[in-house]
Amino acid sequence: MKLASKKLVQAIVLIGLGLALMGASPALAPVAVTGVGSSVTDPASLPALNEFIDAVQGGDAQRLAGLYVEDVLALPVVQQPAGDPVFVSSRDGEVTQFMLADQFGNTGVLAHNHLAGEAFFDIQPGDEIVLIFGNGSQAAYRVSQMQRYQALSPNSPYSNFIDLSDASQKQISATELFHRTFGAGEGNLVLQTCIWQGNEPSWGRLFIIAEPVPASQLAFEGLRVTVN
């Protein structure tokens, strides 16, 4: 129980810090594929899914290697260094797996909003997201929720938040926010980046929640053929 509580506190700190622009340290970045990712929205410049799989696969079947949304993004995934749960890659064209989310039965992916996270805003409800693993296997998800919050103290680990869809503007704690996102459900995929407002890059938080979907139920034929 103490270990779980410690992990939850670490997760809350990450949400409170809000992926601040100076929060990632390039010196801590692990060696990763950086030349195959793209967060541009021009479909002509994105690789096909099978091409992207070939580019990012290699290694452990448990290692999350790539994130793909048809016509939106194709990004390699890097892992957080051991003992550094607030690390977020400062390299453009790649995203970071949030390892603490695994402890709550979900998969978390983080990105700065001025880098690869910018493409998260082009994802829409109903979009299908494919995760690629080190051995080339894939898992598919469909976006079910887009949650947006204002951080009342953008750079504080103890900030309260306001759900931007809540007309009452009720404040919630970082703990409650965690349980609504990374701690909600089981087997979900959660993407997080910050919302930039005015001169404040960490003004708010965007969470994209996607649920697992079997290959037979995927909307796009190309994905049905490719996804395991």
Image: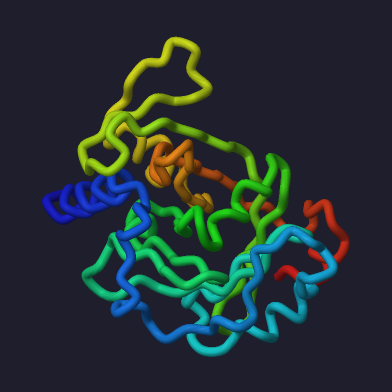
Q: Is residue 22 above or below residue 200?
A: below
Residue 116 x, y percent position in the rendering:
55, 62
Residue 192 x, y percent position in the rendering:
47, 50
Q: Is residue 55 left or right of residue 133?
A: right
Instruction: Choose between 140 and 17: the one closer to the eye.
Output: 17
Query: Residue shown at 60%/51% (left/top)?
Result: 120
Query: Residue shown at 32%/39% (left/top)?
Result: 154
Instruction: Choose between 213 and 20: the one closer to the eye.
Output: 20
Which residue appears farthest toward the left when viewing the image? 2
Q: Is residue 98 left or right of residue 133?
A: left
Q: Is residue 210 above or below residue 225?
A: above
Which residue appears farthest toward the front when viewing the image? 199
Q: Is residue 225 above or below residue 128?
A: below
Query: Residue shown at 41%/31% (left/top)?
Result: 150
Query: Residue shown at 50%/34% (left/top)?
Result: 148
Which residue appears farthest toward the top when viewing the image? 168
Residue 161 x, y percent position in the rendering:
34, 29
Q: Is residue 193 left or right of residue 42?
A: left
* Colour theme: rainbow
In this rendering, the count of numbered labels is 0
The part of the image, by quadrant, that contains residue 129 is bottom right
Which residue appears farthest toward the right when viewing the image? 221
Residue 200 x, y percent position in the rendering:
40, 41
